Image: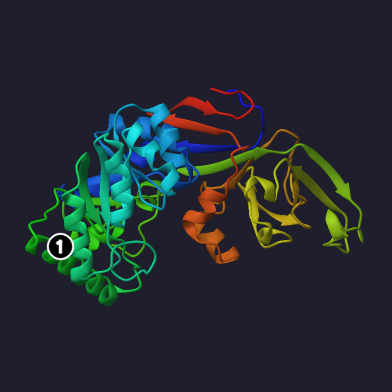
Amino acid sequence: MECCRSTVCYINFDQMDINLETLRDKINNECDVMVVLKADGYGHGAPQMMKHFLKKGVTWFAVAAVNEAMQLRRTCKDGEILVLGYTPDRLLHYAAENNITQTIYSYEQAKILSDLGLNAKIQIKVDTGMNRLGFAVSAESADEVKKIFDLPSLQIEGVFSHMAQLDAEHDEQQYEKFEKFLALCKDRGVTFKRRHLCNGKSAIKYPHMRYEMCRAGSVITGFCLNVPGTDAIQPSMTVETEIVRIHTVPAGEGMGYDLLDPADHDRVIATLPFGYADGIPKALSNHVGWVVINGEKCEYTGNFCMDMCMCDVTHLKDVKVGDKVQVYGGEKGMNFFDLREKTGVGLSNLQILIHKRVPRIYIENGKEIYCDDALLGE
């Protein structure tokens, strides 16, 4: 498939489908899965993911901000979209006008939406311990939620909270706080048709916390650590490029900015057309990380540049310009766990880092189906 760059990020929907079905199987389809698409679907392309998962029976999607929700709504008229995070009061009308569900954590926000008279959709956010957004677990908060339920022109779609995921003990404490809040609301005649507390991993671990829905982000894109029976959940993103120059660097010469990594022997060096501006961490420079060329590991040499980097191919036979290079993924390539170990950057963060200027090629049923390239357009 034609792209305007040699460095390409492949997004494998077939693997995402395996991840989703593994999750559904592990939770015995006891609750709906809300697919989280914040940060452009963790770098995988939120509009493309929403269109794909609508075909797989997913009806609920979540983002962090209203501009992300608007992007999805322009792409897909179907499907429910929840804004999980903060929206300024002056922008709340965009949610109501575009069939987007807004997270609410104060009566004042709900009143703004109610006054629009558009039958706006909302969900109530509860703070069970992360101390970010949400109603406190208290009688006063339950009273305020009751006032929200009494407002006209609102559809209250559900209630939710986030777990800090420190350990099982703290998870259980947050669950108990959530239950207390639900009980306080019920005492006031307020019940919710959708409740959600868990992400995908927590929903697998804690059957009693599943409620009607769970939110799955990193599980869909390939991470579910230390949970038995989830080995099928694997990353769906790989990155590839090609060699654009091969030359000999004489003994004693360094390379790149600061002329790092001089050696006591001549070396054959390959130049690769990507750099830290493409989202490959600069911390991999100078023999920390590697790529795979012709089935062999080749270490980075010198400092990463913004748009290019170099690797040592002295040990390769018959290497040439145009040879394919596995940057992330593959049998011997750096996987995201290698990257986390080498850089200290979180797994999902590493996926999000891959810049939009790197074209995304989407794979479905084993075939390349679409290229999202900023230069080519749609």
Question: On the image, which quarter does residue 223 sit in?
Answer: bottom left
The residue closer to the viewer here, 70 or 23, is 70
- Give the answer, above or below, for where 221 lies relative to 176: above
Relative to 42, 308 lies left or right: right
- Give the answer, above or below, for where 239 lies relative to 370: below
Relative to 105, 261 lies left or right: right
* Element at label 1: helix
Residue positioned most to the bottom: 169
The residue closer to the viewer here, 198 or 235, is 198
Residue at 71% x, 61% y is 287
The residue closer to the viewer here, 195 or 47, is 195
Structural crowding at the residue carrying mark 1, measured as other residues with C-alpha within 10 Å and reported as few (<14), some (14–19) or many (≥20): some
Residue at 65% x, 55% y is 290
Q: Position of residue 104 (x, y in %)?
A: 31, 52
Count of numbered circles on the image: 1
The residue closer to the viewer here, 62 or 345, is 62
Q: Position of residue 260 (x, y in %)?
A: 84, 61
Residue 55 in view? yes
Q: Position of residue 313 (x, y in %)?
A: 75, 49
Q: Which residue is mark 1?
A: 182
Q: Quadrant of the N terminus?
A: top right
